Image (cartoon, rainbow, N blue to C red):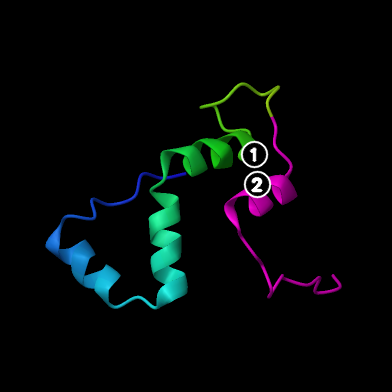
Amino acid sequence: MAEPTDWRSQTTERALNRLERQGFAWEFLRRNPDYRSDYDRMRGTPASPPSVSLPQRSVAHQWGLRFPDRSRSLGY
């Protein structure tokens, strides 16, 4: 996961102030080091050993994530 921008910069502060609840919650969550660690392990990034893997559902449940508009197959 890419490093988020510094929330203390004026540009970022203005952008955060324009967000609705869901967007602000996401910005807060993605800056959480524990979430970032879980995400990296789930994705199998080099930041974690390949033997460690967390099912996506477990990570989503732990962090209270919901995906109501899941993408659908286009039938190709």
Q: Is residue 22 above or below residue 45?
A: below
Q: Secondary structure at mark 1?
A: helix
Residue at x-position 60% and y-position 34%: 41
Residue 25, position in %: x, y? Answer: 43, 64
Dominant secondary-structure state across the stretch colored magenta: loop
Q: Nearer the viewer, residue 30 or 74?
A: 30
Residue count near mark 1 (Cα–Cα under 10 Å), binned few <14, some 14–19, many ≥20: some
Give the side of residue 49 with respect to residue 51, left or right. Answer: left
Residue 48, position in %: x, y? Answer: 56, 25
Q: Is residue 45 above or below residue 57?
A: above
Quadrant showing the C terminus = bottom right
Q: Secondary structure at mark 2?
A: helix
Magenta range: 53-76
The amino acid pointed to by label 1 is Met
Residue 57 lies in the magenta stretch: yes
The amino acid pointed to by label 2 is Val
Identify residue for label 2: 59
Residue 71 lies in the magenta stretch: yes
